[in-house]
Amino acid sequence: MAVTEADTRSPLADALRQILGNENVLTDADNRRFYSSDVYREAVPAEIVIRPGGTEDLQRAVKAATQAGYAVFPRGGGLSYTDGYLPDRQKAVMVDLLRLKKIIEINTEDMYVTVEPGVSWAELYEALKVKGVRTPYFGALSGLYSTVGGAMSQNSLFFGSGTYGTAADQCLGLEVVLADGRLIKTGSGATPFNPTPFFRTYGPDLTGLFLGDTGALGLKVKITLKLIRAPAVTKYASFAFDEPEQIAAAMSEIARQQLAVECFGFDPFLQAQRLKRAGLIKDIKSLAGVARSGRGLLDGMKEAAKVALAGRRMFEGVNYSLHLVIEGRDEAVVESQLAAARQIAEGAGGKEIENSLPKIMRGTPFVEPQSMLGPDGQRWVPIHAMVPHSRANKLLNAVHDYFDSNNDLLEKNRIEWGYLLSTCGAQVFLMEPVFFWLDARHYYHERYLGADYISKLKTYPADMAAREAVHTLRRGLAKLFMEMGATHFQIGKSYLYREGREPETYKLLEALKDYVDPQHLMNPGSLGLK
């Protein structure tokens, strides 16, 4: 996509430079193209990219933009793949929030932490670790770059989700900048009388209105999250299953009993893709992380040695694999939970295998986002659905049937697919189909991953037919998931949110949008809002 320079002399650009400084107002073609792309698609480049460094500057900049009739699109770590922040018009200002990255308060007496939106989950995890605490959910796999603010807007799960739920579940209160520059506070901190952000639901849950809003209702500038004491003991287990129904049954019962803080699995294809990634087992950083995660240096070194010895052999003859992380305050409690999980897994037909993978993932939880491309440089994009445990098998069967019915389209366009399974709290079963296809990369991939890594990957010519086929297949799955009553994270502009809501429910959202954003200039198109 060819992108021309924006008019650097526009009245709005000049006004924004007065507020933010020349270096924080970008109008060159490369930056406009990069910031207006995500993992999956390139969009209409925003006319201006701004990088505010404080709440007051952000308020003034947003007010100036919307008063000039420009749409505002908030961007966090930039790892969306659902058009979450992509502009739908050129007359747009992209707001890069990564300079808002202060950790404002770590309160280990009242057990909360307050941060700005640009703080990454990895940065927060490291800052809390030295104090012996963490957030209950403590980040996605992309947490090296994905931000706390992005997770509040898009929601997410992974580390800690098996017990503690989603990113949004950890939130105690917010400060939000609206489209006209107003500042809204929520939770117990929203009082002029000795405010403290320790409690979320004092009266109606106004915090929840802005969580999972994909930035359509406002820009989060302060976020307060729960804290817990770091667990004293962590143990791991992995199991092999022959059939998808077996692994689903085991995962659902482990979730219902709240035995594991992480409970996830792979189908044969995605498992094989993961093993292709360079250095998964022998990567020095991963082994060092495993060593550090032990209860002592000797214990950690023994664990690292076991991982290295197991190598890729741990998946020989394995069809579906299930991986568990179990943690608690003492050895006896964790051993009891591990024994119960083992009994469930084996009762569902599982066979215990070497637990190297969950050890590696916990040893180095946040890694470079190289999975935004396939291990051979293929294009990559997921889609997911969350259902209650009673519909887990129905979801699995429906997805397999869907791909079987579209096999000709898959083969014609050389599209491959696999899936991740996960649980979230006691109620949620998640399935995430992932597409791989041979197609040209975007400028986004080149810049995000860097020349050194990109140079090691294969390069493919643009394949617009395959790209369109993937889009068609994802759209069909989104419709299938909607009809099953499934829910989603990262709604953005990809999932059928509007179509899947009761009319009166959606009217309430529209009324809220009219109040916080009367001109509908805050991330227009997101959540299906016109």
Image (cartoon, rainbow, N blue to C red):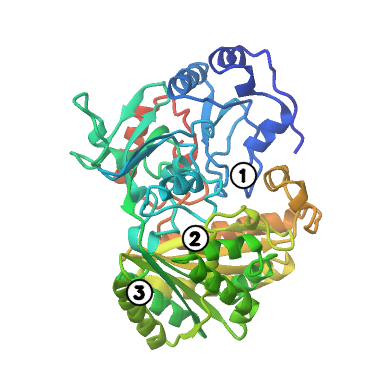
Q: Earlier along the polypeptide chain: callout 3 or callout 2?
A: 3
In front: label 1 or label 3: 3
Question: What residue is shown with label 3?
Answer: 254
Determine whether the residue tagged by mark 2 lies in a helix, strand or loop. Answer: loop
Disc 1 residue type (three-letter): Asp
**Mark 2, other Cα within 10 Å: few <14 / some 14–19 / many ≥20:** many
Q: Determine whether label 1 and label 3 are within 8 Å by CB.
A: no
Determine whether the residue tagged by mark 3 lies in a helix, strand or loop. Answer: helix
Question: What residue is shown with label 2?
Answer: 384
- Give the alpha-carbon distance from disc 1 to disc 3, as whole Å: 35 Å
**Residue 123 pos. (x, y %):** 50, 44
Is residue 27 placed above or below 215 in the rendered structure? above
Res 390 seen here: no
Q: In this view, does 514 lie to the left or right of 272?
A: left
Disc 2 residue type (three-letter): His
Disc 3 residue type (three-letter): Ile
- Give the alpha-carbon distance from disc 1 to disc 2, as whole Å: 17 Å
> Which one is in front, 147 or 320?
147
Q: Earlier along the polypeptide chain: callout 1 or callout 3?
A: 1
